[in-house]
Image: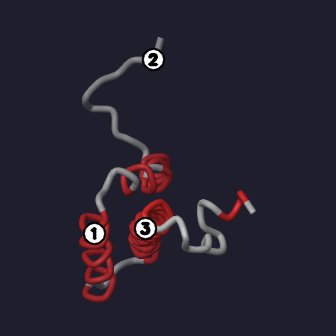
Amino acid sequence: MARKTSKDPTPPQPAAREHHEGADGAAGDLSYSQARTALELVLAELQASDLDVEAMIGLYRRGQAYARRCGAILDQVEQDVLLWDALNDPDAPPQPGGPLSSQD
């Protein structure tokens, strides 16, 4: 049985790896505005701080996760708008790559 005490230190390498692996998961819960603000804060910290390489890599990866979240939200909004346009204007031809293009 593994013993747990509050004095046991957490190993830095696994904790850093867990944080990186969870970066997209945490970013996935953010709104566009929250992800963009977080990305701007990461970029400001990268520009303003005298960081060691490991810290810089961690910030860079977090920034990538926030940027991917922003991109995913924008892609979804674009698809929603195309679908809405197609549903509200049945005479309009389907957009290439849009939700109705598979019915051709």
Image coordinates for residue 16, horizontal then vertical, percent: 44, 54
- What's the residue at 31%, 66% (across, down)? 32
Q: Which residue type carries mark 1?
A: Ala
Residue 16 placement, left or right of 32: right
Residue 1 placement, left or right of 35: right
State whether residue 79 is above or below residue 40. above
Image coordinates for residue 46, horizontal then vertical, percent: 33, 82
Image coordinates for residue 8, horizontal then vertical, percent: 33, 33
- What's the residue at 26%, 83% (across, down)? 44
Identity of the residue furthest to the bottom in this view: 47
- What's the residue at 68%, 64% (across, down)? 101
Q: Secondary structure at mark 3?
A: helix
Q: Secondary structure at mark 2?
A: loop
The foreground one among 93 and 76 is 93
Q: Secondary structure at mark 1?
A: helix
> Is tag 1's residue or tag 3's residue first in the polypeptide sequence?
1
The answer to whether mark 1 and mark 3 are in CB contact below 8 A is no
Front position among marks 1 and 3: 3
Image coordinates for residue 83, horizontal then vertical, percent: 49, 62
- Residue named by callout 3: 81
- Residue named by callout 1: 38
Label 2, label 3: how far apart the Cα atoms are? 53 Å
State whether residue 37 is above or below residue 84. below
Q: Which residue type carries mark 3?
A: Val
The numbered mark at residue 87 is none
- Residue named by callout 2: 2
Q: Quadrant of the C terminus?
A: bottom right
- What's the residue at 39%, 71% (across, down)? 59
Q: Which residue type carries mark 2?
A: Ala
The answer to whether mark 2 and mark 3 are in CB contact below 8 A is no
Q: Residues within 10 Å of mark 3 (few under 14, many from 20)?
A: few
